[in-house]
Amino acid sequence: MTQPTPIDTHPLARFAATLRWQDIPDAVRARAEDLCVDWFGSVLAGQGARPVRSIACFALSQGPAQGPSEVIGQAASTSPLMAALANAAAAHVAEQDDVHNGSVFHPAAVVFAPAVAVAQSLGASGAQLLTACVAGYEVGIRVGEFLGRSHYKVFHTTGTAGTFAAAAAVGHLLGLSPAQMQHALGSAGTQSAGLWEFLRTAADSKQLHTAHAAAAGLMAAYLAKDGFTGAQDIFTGPQGMAAGMSTDADPARLTDGLGTRWATAETSFKWHASCRHTHPAADALLQVMQQHGLRAEDIAQVTCHVHQGAIDVLGPVAAPATVHQSKFSMGTVLALAARFGHAGLGEFDAEFLAPGTVALRERVAMVLDPEVDAAYPRRWIGKVTVHTVVGRVLQGRVDEPKGDPGHTLSREEITAKALRLARYGTALPPGRAEAAVQRLWRLHAWPRVQRLLGED
Amino acid sequence: MTQPTPIDTHPLARFAATLRWQDIPDAVRARAEDLCVDWFGSVLAGQGARPVRSIACFALSQGPAQGPSEVIGQAASTSPLMAALANAAAAHVAEQDDVHNGSVFHPAAVVFAPAVAVAQSLGASGAQLLTACVAGYEVGIRVGEFLGRSHYKVFHTTGTAGTFAAAAAVGHLLGLSPAQMQHALGSAGTQSAGLWEFLRTAADSKQLHTAHAAAAGLMAAYLAKDGFTGAQDIFTGPQGMAAGMSTDADPARLTDGLGTRWATAETSFKWHASCRHTHPAADALLQVMQQHGLRAEDIAQVTCHVHQGAIDVLGPVAAPATVHQSKFSMGTVLALAARFGHAGLGEFDAEFLAPGTVALRERVAMVLDPEVDAAYPRRWIGKVTVHTVVGRVLQGRVDEPKGDPGHTLSREEITAKALRLARYGTALPPGRAEAAVQRLWRLHAWPRVQRLLGED
């Protein structure tokens, strides 16, 4: 008996539908391109992982043998839906993809995968793709903030908010009207899913969550383009997201600073391939070494001045037995950073038990620092005291870990990271990933989005 | 830092994986076949609906141009995933598909669509298909009961529990081990979704929910077959379904009577195409008419003795203006039943405003009946007093509406209903649906599941 009731278009739907390239500040446009290159590296890094191969294999088996959309890292091309499924699964597995701190949401995995697949299918320009991805970031991050901490306790926000992010990005590419975008967000939210329960046994669900979000959001947008209707108030309606999946949802966050505050540019890059709690100290150590021209063998001892959370999480890991565990060992992370200038996926795999790593690891200690602890989690300050073998005592300090918005990566660093990730996850011929990354740096000028990795 | 912890296989996963045709009582086997024919009619009825066409069109555009699985009612065949998406969308739109009262769950839509698509792809036998579908019904109904009333207030259980039902049915066909089935249920639950918010504006999400559940469950099962892992305690773990999506979940319901209580056989068929509150009185009127050889024109007045809920929902509808509204008009429903012996989709569309219908509609009244009201909702008793034009006063009574387990449909009635639905939703050549239904009645003996509707 329910009759359709006209309802105003939500400002978030209108924003996502009507955002134009010329509305986006230059710095945000450039950051979107940075995030795209960073995402591309993460997709290449994830190619070989078993859960990713399972999802890609399923997607290819259920899709057409040929299609307009690239399955990155494979010769295959398929339909946009299936490419989105495969590529979204790949982006998140190496845990090196971007993160928005306030929403605890990893936007790249669920935005770029469906948007690139659809852009390739439509022949959209690079600027159109980037505009759509900014729409996806702005929507997804705000939905994550809206859903709040109570949601994040049980739900994996990258899966849930990610469905909206994917719908917004794809809907923008499809040219949805504001009303159609509202329907797309309704259809996205009613498919929104992802529970943390898999953590209990380290199951593969994280890859399923990004794949699902990308595919469900893409489908929501395509259906809306065809006139399929969705809930008009999926966020705050009495049987919507907040009612079912949050106890502290804050509707004001959905529209916070729309068009003036660019959440896209608040997104952090991950630099080291380790637990985030190790990053500030690792960066402070690298600063000391660079400033004083130290090599790893010059270091006698390192004292890290840290927040309590770092001691809680990292303290128990004295002698890591596995690669995964070593990423939670402050000593291992600092030793790899000191020895190689960076603690990346490859360094962990090859060197976490090497004698040079273990020797230095044993000479790293943590102490609680009141200033660092008081600033956390608003700021992640890194402070170290380094004793050298010749008896010098040196202090290092960084106020934001490398990759955070106030200490973001340069394009050279993003390139280097992406190429490291490509080498880690693929066996591409020399120069192929490098050429692809160099092309991607001109994405804003592409007249038409083609295969990102190029042809074999 | 989470390390895999061995956990016992949940009895529900073990049951779904190991159920055998020979374990299923004859009456339940036959009921599964009944439910399959009934589902087939609902799929044909839904073919022409706009939201169904949108989803089918999307599925066909994203899948292969040819494949092993039938898109029912179309010449097209595609991959199992895409056929499941399209066929699951179709089954629920006419609101004539089956329902399990205790779980408020519509199993057929989310079980048969993915199971048939996968059985066609594997070349499974009819008995294998039916066994898998019984596994799907038993799992989905128990998950719905487990999630409880608090869940149903916000979530559309057919979408949420449906994801598990689809995974169980498909997983059974794929021959998953109990451990793999547990992973499949974990992957299903972490994609489980569907919010009632769409009701506010009568949006199309119901079709999306069944399509999504079928596709997500199918994917969960295929991935599990390939070694992809899922949460081990998706139901009751601290970050699982109960934690995130229910406040009154009852874990005992997950295993209630497994292997002895057959929830499949508790499932109700819908007979009239109207609000369920009208069914008991319509059946009681038909009983009187049959018993006393009355025609519609013999009836002077009908008094329905009803529960308060019927008055609340149906009372305001005095002069229905639309087909949809007329399904909530007790007078219209009884008039159509009296005139045509059945209030079906076709009767509503063509006759709800016909003079003969309106004249009889005006002579139907409802009064609250203490006995009927006290029995509700455990029993839906139908009681009418009929005054005839020649002055007779006749009483009619049914203790369960037609289609409920204690008053189930005969195979002749199921056939008649399916063919009515086929005529309603398709323009098939004469005899084609009939031949298909007759073939389906031998499903248990099929050596290999082929196209249900046959070739053009």
Image (cartoon, coloured by chain):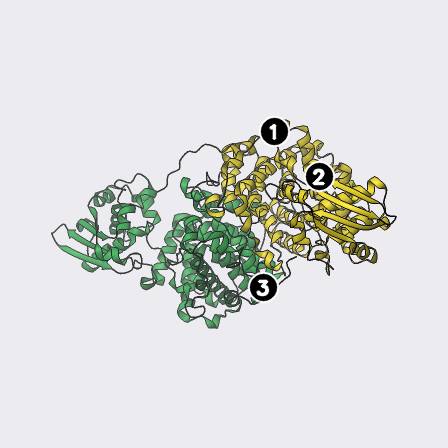
Chain colours: A green, B yellow
Frontmost of labels 2 and 3 is 2
Give neighbour class at mark 3: few <14, some 14-19, many 20+ (Cα, 10 Å): many
Residue under numbered circle 1: B20
Q: Chain of mark 3?
A: A
Tell me: A96 left or right of B44: left
State how far apart marks 1 and 2 are (Cα).
35 Å
State how far apart marks 2 and 3 are (Cα).
47 Å
- Circle 2 SS class: loop
Residue A125 screen position, x and y as percent: 52, 66
Most extreme residue toward the left, as rendered?
Answer: A391
Labelled pair 1, 2 in contact (Cβ < 8 Å) = no
Residue B427 seen in the current view: no
Residue under numbered circle 2: B399
Q: Chain of mark 1?
A: B
Residue under numbered circle 3: A180
Task: Report whether mark 2 lies on the same chain as mark 3.
Answer: no
Frontmost of labels 1 and 2 is 2
For the residue pair A165 and A189, the one nearer the viewer reads as: A189
**Dot label at residue B345:** none
Residue A152 seen in the current view: yes
Task: Report whether mark 1 lies on the same chain as mark 2.
Answer: yes
Residue A311 screen position, x and y as percent: 26, 47
Tell me: A177 left or right of B10: right
* A249 w.r.t. B101: above or below: below
* A372 w.r.t. B262: above or below: below
